[in-house]
Image: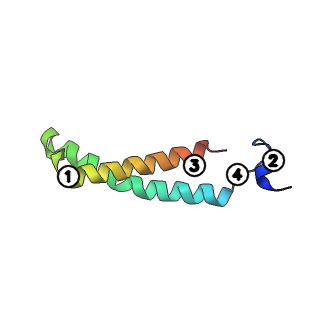
């Protein structure tokens, strides 16, 4: 029986894909965490530059990937 005809509770998660998504998510999260630490040390007005905003969006994407990898069925 093909996988698209099975019930959702019968399908198994691919552990290798989940692990890959977690690793990529953590890698994407690291620059955002470092950027947040630097902004905290430099003060509130230091985070207005566009590169900082881009790095924070990448980190948010990494966080979303981690959440998706953990919660997907």
Residue depth check, mark 2 versus mark 3: number of the one nearer the observer: 2
The residue sitting at the right extreme is: 1
Check disc 2 and report the residue beneath it.
6
Q: CA distance from mark 1 to mark 3?
A: 29 Å
Report whether residue 33 is seen. no
Check disc 1 and report the residue beneath it.
50
- Compare marks 4 and 1 and give the one earlier in the sequence: 4
Q: Residues within 10 Å of mark 2 (few under 14, many from 20)?
A: few
Choose top left, top right, bottom left or bottom right for residue 40: top left
- In this picture, residue 71 sits left or right of residue 45: right
- Label 4: state its secondary structure: loop
Question: What label sits on residue 42 in the rendered view?
Answer: none
Residue at 47%, 54% (x, y): give it.
25
Residue 47: x and y in percent read 18, 45
- Label 2: state its secondary structure: loop
Q: CA distance from mark 3 to mark 4?
A: 10 Å
Residue at 20%, 52% (x, y): give it.
50
Q: CA distance from mark 2 to mark 3?
A: 21 Å
Q: CA distance from mark 2 to mark 1?
A: 47 Å
Residue depth check, mark 1 versus mark 3: number of the one nearer the observer: 1
- Compare marks 1 and 3 and give the one earlier in the sequence: 1
Q: Residues within 10 Å of mark 4 (few under 14, many from 20)?
A: few
9 vs 41, nearest the viewer: 9
């Amino acid at each position: 029986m093909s996988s698209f005809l099975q019930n959702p509770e019968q399908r198994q998660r691919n552990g290798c894909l989940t692990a890959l998504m977690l690793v990529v998510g953590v890698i994407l999260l690291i620059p955002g965490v470092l950027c947040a630490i630097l902004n905290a040390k430099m003060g509130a007005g230091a985070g207005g530059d566009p590169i900082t905003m881009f790095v924070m969006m990448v980190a948010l994407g990494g966080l979303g990937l981690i959440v998706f990898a953990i919660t997907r069925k």
